[in-house]
Image: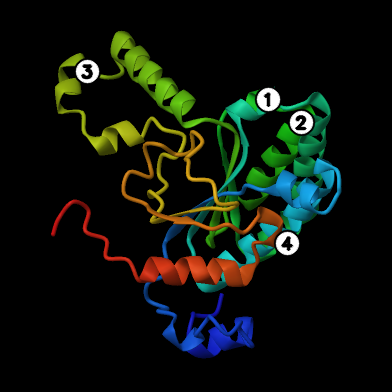
Amino acid sequence: MPPLTLERLNELFAPAPSDIDLAAFDTSRVPKHIAVIMDGNGRWAQERGLMRAAGHKAGIEGVRELIRTSNDIGVRFLTIYSFSTENWSRPYQEIELLMNLFAKTMAAEIEALHKEQVRVVTIGDTSKLPEETRKTFERAIARTEGNTGMTLVVALNYGARAEILKAVRAIARDAASGVLDIAAIDAFDEIAFTNYLDTAGIPDPELLIRTSGEYRLSNFLLYQIAYSELYITDTLWPDFDRYELLRAVMDYQGRNRRFGGI
């Protein structure tokens, strides 16, 4: 991937909308890890008099553009909230559509992602997914595991509370079996704990983006986003394009991240 320079930005994004000054983009302050709650597919379809399925299908192209643009500007980790543990409460037909979309889209994109050196990983309990969907992601993970470019983290059947509970149970099992010295638990620090999370080895997001104007976290990366900068946009997910991502990153670049200090 070519280094990100002003010239490269102009190659990728010019002509930019009038509210985006590419010269003001700080190529040295691109977030290492961006996490995205992709919301608004249903409302996007409803506003157009379409079935919800049309919104989900339109949202897939937004995912493709998000991945391409994040990789182009030098993001190292991109986490997308694709399906939560709570989403199983949706109508069966919608769940079936989503699972089929996940499988077909990932199957179609594996080679392109591999060519761009993108590494695919998943977080969440994928054992509960339909077999075709689960196996498709397993193939993507295996195909791209040696890649050295951006890491695409796909949250599937993921919930932060479930993740934290799973980590606590694993710690308890390791302590009971002797793998973890009980006496050492008093010295257990945040780094040791994060090694039990689904995101072990992945840095915390610097920037969390949520589309559709909703001001909630929806059980997403609750431990990891303790100091993430939040960017909420009214834009519905299918309308979130590369310029929307640039706006989010440039807003992030204007923040003063103090981490509790002055």
Please, what secondary structure does the residue beneath circle 2 have? helix
In whole angstroms, how far apart are the C-alphas of marks 4 and 3? 45 Å
In the rendered image of this protein, does residue 11 appear above or below residue 260? below
| Residue count near mark 3 (Cα–Cα under 10 Å), binned few <14, some 14–19, many ≥20 | few
In the rendered image of this protein, does residue 258 appear above or below residue 81? below
Please, what secondary structure does the residue beneath circle 3 have? loop
Q: Position of residue 185 (x, y in %)?
A: 20, 21
Circle number at residue 95: 2
Q: Quadrant of the rendered structure where residue 196 is? A: top left
Q: Position of residue 224 (x, y in %)?
A: 38, 42
How many numbered marks have been drawn onto this rendered protein structure? 4
Q: Earlier in the sequence, mark 4 or mark 1?
A: 1
| Residue count near mark 2 (Cα–Cα under 10 Å), binned few <14, some 14–19, many ≥20 | some
Q: Is residue 132 visible?
A: no
Q: Is residue 101 visible?
A: yes
Residue type marked 2 = Ile
Residue type marked 4 = Ala
Q: Which residue is mark 3?
A: 181
By what rule are the colours in the image chosen? rainbow
Q: Which residue is mark 4?
A: 112
Q: Locate the N terminus by quadrant.
A: bottom right
Residue type marked 1 = Trp
In whole angstroms, how far apart are the C-alphas of marks 4 and 1? 30 Å
Q: Earlier in the sequence, mark 2 or mark 3?
A: 2
Q: Nearer the viewer, mark 4 or mark 1?
A: 1
